Amino acid sequence: MTRVKRGYVARRRRKNILKLTSGFQGAHSTLFRTANQQGMKSLTSSHRDRGKRKRDFRRLWITRINAAARRSKKSYHTLIQELYKRKILLNRKMLAQIAILDTYCFSTLLGD
């Protein structure tokens, strides 16, 4: 049988995977098989953690708002409820920033 030269397809695929894992340590960036495994693992982790990051930040903002609200003897739940009743539609990120940077403004939002 004659020899089949595969051309550039396999080489291009390997180069792309090694390019994806170029910043990884040790064999994870140089050996194709381990780089391929680590690249797949990193892509699944990054996909999963994009959603997790959103949840983590929301938890952080709620914690900060709750801490600032409890200084004025209110709970987070009652604060959010009052803001909705008064039609003050600020998201939790903005409320947390106001609670940290401008306590006077936050106290006016509380209605104190």
Image (cartoon, grey):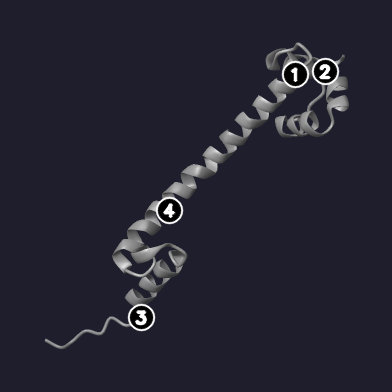
Q: Position of residue 63 (x, y in %)?
A: 65, 25
Q: Residue at x 33, y 57 (%)?
A: 37
> Which amino acid type corresponds to the residue marked 4 in the rendered image?
Ser
43 on left or right of 14: right
Is residue 18 shown above or below 6?
above
Of labels 2 and 4, earlier in sequence is 4
Of badges 4 and 3, the one in the foreground is: 4
Q: Which residue lies under the disc numbered 3?
A: 8
Where does the image place residue 100, in percent across and percent down from the top left? Answer: 77, 31
Report which residue position mark 4 lands on: 42
Amino acid of disc 3:
Tyr
Q: Circle 2 sits in a helix, a strand or a loop, which is it?
A: helix
Q: Foreground mark, 1 or 3?
A: 1
Contact flag, marks 1 and 2 (Cβ < 8 Å): yes
Name the residue located 79 percent from the left edge and 19 percent from the top edge.
83
Please name which of the two marks, 1 or 4, marks the residue nearer to the observer: 1
Q: Amino acid at mark 1?
A: Ala
Classify 22 as above or below 45: below
Instruction: Say whether disc 3 or disc 2 marks the residue closer to the N-terminus.
Output: 3
